[in-house]
Amino acid sequence: MDIDRAGLADFLRRCREALQPEDVGLPRGQRRRTAGLRREEVAALAHMSPDYYSRLERERGPQPSESMVASIAAGLHLSLDQRDHLFRLAGHQPPPRGAEGTHVGPGMLRILDRLDDTPAEVVTELGETLRQTRLGVALLGDASLRTGPARSLGYRWFTDPEVRRRYHPDDHEHLGRLWASGLRAVVAVRGPRSRAAALAEDLLARSEEFREVWARHEVGLRPTDGKRLVHPEVGLLELQCQTLQDPQQGHTLLVYTAVPGSETHEKLQLLSVLAGRVL
């Protein structure tokens, strides 16, 4: 497919002008004359340079890669239909929809944008973190640094001993069974040629513990509402985890909260300071 530079530029401009700062969790500020978002604001949301994004709106520059187009679609909070249209204008086939996709729906993004003072993340059915709030990064680590199978928390649980140090030791046995049970359920739904099946095969080859847990053939295990995390800087955190699911994409929004006035609540406030933002 060839890039439609004029169509791409016009579509980007119209999508940008249709968004207001508060739609994407940005302050409006004073003396705003631009209709919608500024180009540099979209560039920041899409994790690219303002010059690169500006050239796209001016029908200039190289053809954006698929990863660049995906970042722009996420930054502009596009719907799936809008995302697919953007890919075609940029000269690429749209990525798959549903559980195999990584595009977070605009409705879920709008909720996440309003949770900047709360640890929260959007994850796939394989436990891959797609988006995090600022405090979510401080609590759980920066998911953008992970690549390949290691993007899945369940995969890291069985292959990276460092991951377990973030969880209370008394919960380790149950969490291992929980991850194996959840992965088996996804494999049953997605089939033997799915990414879930490939992840299970990889773990079977790498981890003796996973082989033992997998052999139990447990299904239907459910996580508890309470989570005990051990943060390297603030120590033990006893959190509640609320969830919101997007059935169209198979993604889940996880929101971590603490009882007001509790020791964990105070530690979250300290963590926000350490992260460079006072709540």
Image (tube, rainbow, N blue to C red):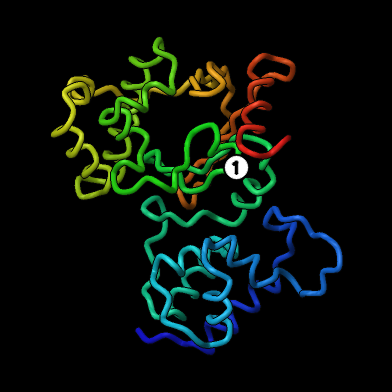
Indicate the amino acid at tag 1.
Arg
Residue 155 vertical position relative to residue 92 in the rendered view, above or below: above
Residue 263 vertical position relative to residue 92 in the rendered view, above or below: above
Image location (x, y in percent) of residue 190: 29, 46
Which residue reaches farthest right?
31
Which residue reaches farthest top?
170
Residue for point 36% across, 73% down: 93
Determine whether, in the image, residue 245 is placed left or right of residue 187.
right
Dot 1: element: helix
Determine whether, in the image, residue 171 is placed left or right of residue 261.
left
Task: Locate the C terminus by quadrant.
Answer: top right
Residue for point 46% across, 51% down: 249
Within the image, what quadrant is residue 202 found in? Answer: top left
Which residue reaches farthest left?
205
Image location (x, y in percent) of residue 71: 49, 63
Front-most of residues 183 and 4: 4
Identify the residue position indicated by label 1 in the image: 134
Front-most of residues 164 and 196: 164
Residue for point 37% across, 45% down: 146
Residue for point 44% across, 15% down: 168
Determine whether, in the image, residue 179 is placed left or right of residue 130.
left
Within the image, what quadrant is residue 34 found in? Answer: bottom right
Residue 271 vertical position relative to residue 4 in the rendered view, above or below: above
How many numbered marks are there?
1
Task: Locate the N terminus by quadrant.
Answer: bottom left
Front-most of residues 84 and 23: 23
Image location (x, y in percent) of residue 252: 50, 41
Callout 1: 10 Å neighbours few (<14), some, many (20+)? many
Image location (x, y in percent) of residue 272: 65, 33
